[in-house]
Image (spheres, rainbow, N blue to C red):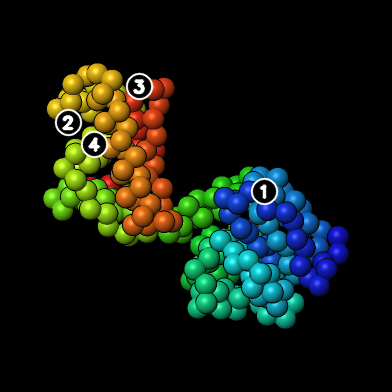
Amino acid sequence: MKHEKDIKHVPVPSAEALHVIVVEDDEQLCDIMVTGLTYLGFGVVGVGDGKALDAAAAQTPPDVVVLDLGLPGEDGIEIINRLRRTSDCGVVVVTARGRLDDRLKGLRQGADHYFVKPVDLRELAAVITNLGQRLAPPRAKWIFIEKKSQLVTPNAVAVSLTSNECIVLSLFAANPGINIQRRRFFEKLDYLDDHSSNLRLEALFSRLRSKVHEADPGCRLPVAARHSQGYAFLDELGR
């Protein structure tokens, strides 16, 4: 395998895949790691040194860097120091330097994990996955503030609620991800269990969807009808 300008691109398997840059000057080993990690579900770029790492990171910032220490030009320890000043990415060292002093130095400089070659790609993949999950920023969620009669979108936009809208959202908050039968809404809203009440409930949700979209065009209220029997809130709803 030859590096094209020291960067080997491999198609990212999916938009959700962790983006990994492998920094390894042994071209055959780099190819093995890139191919193996791609097969295991990551989006991977292989590079041969620190300059090529910078070029690849400028195109797509990595979630995790898999880093050899014995590199031409800038040493791997220096790269770790630089990454720690400029990036929040995870750093996993994979190197032939197996002495305790070397391992301690790498970890003290900021490596999240340290492997001595050879490394099993399945174990490396498990470490990358765990590291990516730990470093991922917390996902924004919907917040129902009952005392203020507000629903806050993941974009932090507060939407004022009517008393009936508060009632249905309190049911959703108490039953996360669960399909709630129409009759339970009817009971809480003091509706009769008839066709007219079905129409009133559908109109309530329609108005709430429109209200959310008007206040925050980037969000859609994640309420869906299920099996014509009830409704579910299909996202995390905090209180």
Q: Quadrant of the N terminus?
A: bottom right
Visible in this render: residue 204?
A: yes
Where residue 152 appears, as percent x and y from the top left, is 29, 54
> Which of the pair 16/143 is nearer the observer?
143
In which image quadrant can residue 45 be found? bottom right
Q: Are marks 1 and 4 in contact (CB under 8 Å)?
A: no
Which residue type does callout 1 highlight?
A: Pro
The answer for how far apart the CA atoms under marks 3 and 1 are is 38 Å
Give the mark, 3 or 2, whose residue is nearer the N terminus.
2
**Do residues under tags 2 and 4 come within 8 Å of each other at their CB atoms?**
yes
Q: Which residue is the site of mark 1?
A: 13
| Position in image of residue 12 (x %, y %) | 68, 53
- Which numbered disc, 3 or 1, marks the residue that appears first in the sequence? 1
- Give the residue displayed 50% in from the left and 50% down from the top: 130
**Which residue is located at x 68 percent, y 57 percent?**
44
Callout 1–callout 2 Cβ contact below 8 Å:
no
Q: Identity of the amino acid at label 2?
A: Leu
- For disc 4, the marked residue is 168
Spatial CA distance of label 1 from label 4 is 40 Å
Q: Is mark 2 on a helix, strand or loop?
A: helix
Q: Which of marks 2 and 4 is in front?
A: 2
Which residue type carries mark 4? Val
Label 1, label 2: how far apart the Cα atoms are:
47 Å
For disc 1, the neighbor class at 10 Å (few under 14, some 14 to 19, many from 20) is some
Q: What is the number of the mark on residue 39?
A: none
Label 4 neighbour load within 10 Å: few <14, some 14-19, many 20+ = many
Tell me which residue sits at (24%, 25%) in the image.
197
Q: Identify the element where label 4 is drawn.
A: helix
Residue at the disc numbered 2: 189
